[in-house]
Amino acid sequence: MIKTLSIRNFGIIRAHDIHFSSGLHVITGETGAGKSLVLGALGLLMGERYDGQPVLDPDHKCVIEAEFVNDDPDLGEWLHEQGFERADLIILRRELSAPARSRCFIQDTPASLTQLRDISYWLIDICGQHDARELKSARIHLEYLDEFAQCRELALQYKRAYADWQRTERRLKDLEEKISKMHRDHALNHFYLDEIQSIGIKGPGELAELELQHRLFEQSKNIQEALQQAIWELDGHEQGLINRTNLLQRQIRPFYELSEEGKEIYEYYEQAVAALKEAVLLAGRWSDSFSSEGEDPQPILDRIDKINQLLLKHQARDLAELIEKSKEMEQSSVLANQDLEALEELKEKSNQHSEAATKLAQSLDQQRAEALPLLEQAMQHLMPSSGFTNARFEVVMQRSDDLLGDTSGYNQVEFKFTANPGQIPASLQKVASGGELSRLTLCLRTACRPQNDSSAVVFDEIDTGISGQTALGIGRLLKQMADSRQQIVLITHLPQIAAAANRHFKVSKSSTSNQTISVIEDLDTEARIHVLAGMMAGTEAGEPARQQAEALIKLYLN
């Protein structure tokens, strides 16, 4: 139940503080005075999207706050789970500023829009003209039946189970396609792997080593000539570099002990001779390693070509990548076995999800079938109060052989209706007018609302398209709903309905040269009679209109 609603700086509202109680509350006023802004503020508080609607004073933020009284233990559990203070008094606040910025609070603790939407399930139920138009949708028919059968939570469980099953089925299908492709590729991979393994790659550096060997073969003659020339120049004659360095060393020997510099020079000569002798030995060994006759480089060239062909064929940049690809081919059979195991697991999981969804669908089917005639009876009882004296209302439920998506289970539900005796009920989309849809929506909301539901019900001009005795019937129905168990807030243009209210708020606007401001009044008895008389007369109310207004109020007191 709504206790208070505070609106600051929203649209043409500077400041509204509305105090609610139990029973039926009506909001009336001329078009454009700001009635819908009150419901718009409630909608934003329930998590509707804020798209930057203008505020009265752009230099200040808009603040919407409401207090609700709700002792539902499920709500208390939800508050605790979400980290909010658990209490019977629930405080919601939303702060809005340009451009389209929004902050949300639950129990003075920052909250998300999703949390606002979630908590609204327990606090308020807003029904407008759009909801009446939606009554033409079969999806809404199923929701109403589930609300009446009190199996809405079961339907949501089915929706989750069905989604899990479908998600597992998609994964299963993808894996089956993958395994099928792996089987098709297995023979080709096996051929490729044999081809790579048959050449016996010695390692990632083999190609570079082969190319180096080939270059040595190509340059072997030149290398040998250069090496022989070096050996001759170093140690092949009396004027060779080694002999000449030895001579220089002998020349300085008598003097090298006379100074440190002399010793260093002598040692450098000695090291130079040793290094040159080592170079001669290495050059000789390298030269001897080249065979002068009969060496054939063709096998090396053939292997280089074969390796390059494999690299090109398998689009590998080097041998390291080719070796890695061959390992992947070896692993493919291992992975195939792993995928087969995963396939079996997915099949088992899919069966489990299917069984869970099936059990839930069967329970839904049973509960819906049991509730269906009871909903028809409830509607037949309520419709006369809404002006449907001889109307017929039927609930048609078809059972599918296969599970259906969303919350359907096995069932497809459609409401059928006729307002005229002797006619066969037909689809609402074909036979119900806008006014009839509004009245049927009211009857359905009344029939389907649980007895222990303490949330407020808000109707936005649900009385569209009705008048006269029908309006009185709607007023009685609303009064009955409010007196029995509910708090109802209603925007209306009809005096017949406004007269049924326990509390009557009038919204008006006052204008200056540069600003229009919405004002809301909680009417006392005298002011209420005056407003109702004006609504009936359409002009300034006279005494006859006042007497009619008083009579209308007394009509609901009897």
Image (spheres, rainbow, N blue to C red):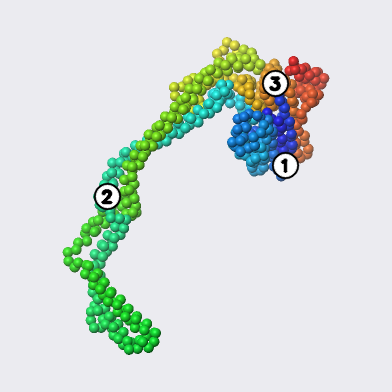
Three-letter code, disc 1: Asp
Residue 263 x/y as whole percent: 36, 84
Residue 389 - label: none
Disc 3 + disc 2, Cβ < 8 Å: no
Residue 197 - label: 2
State the separation of the CA atoms marked 1 and 3.
40 Å
The number of callouts visible is 3
State the separation of the CA atoms marked 1 and 2.
80 Å
Sooner in the amino-acid sequence: mark 1 or mark 3: 1
Q: Which residue position holds label 3?
A: 483
Location of residue 202 by image quarter = bottom left
Query: Residue furthest toward the top?
Result: 422
**Residue depicted at 25% across the width and 52% down the height:** 199
Location of residue 463 by image quarter = top right
Q: Which residue position holds label 1?
A: 57
Mark 1 nearby-residue class (10 Å; few <14, some 14–19, many ≥20): some
Mark 3 nearby-residue class (10 Å; few <14, some 14–19, many ≥20): some
Residue 48 visible in the snapshot = no
Location of residue 353 by image quarter = top left
Disc 1 + disc 3, Cβ < 8 Å: no
Residue 515 x/y as whole percent: 75, 39
Left or right for 127, reference 426: right
Residue 451 visible in the snapshot = yes
Under circle 2, the secondary element is: helix
Mark 2 nearby-residue class (10 Å; few <14, some 14–19, many ≥20): few
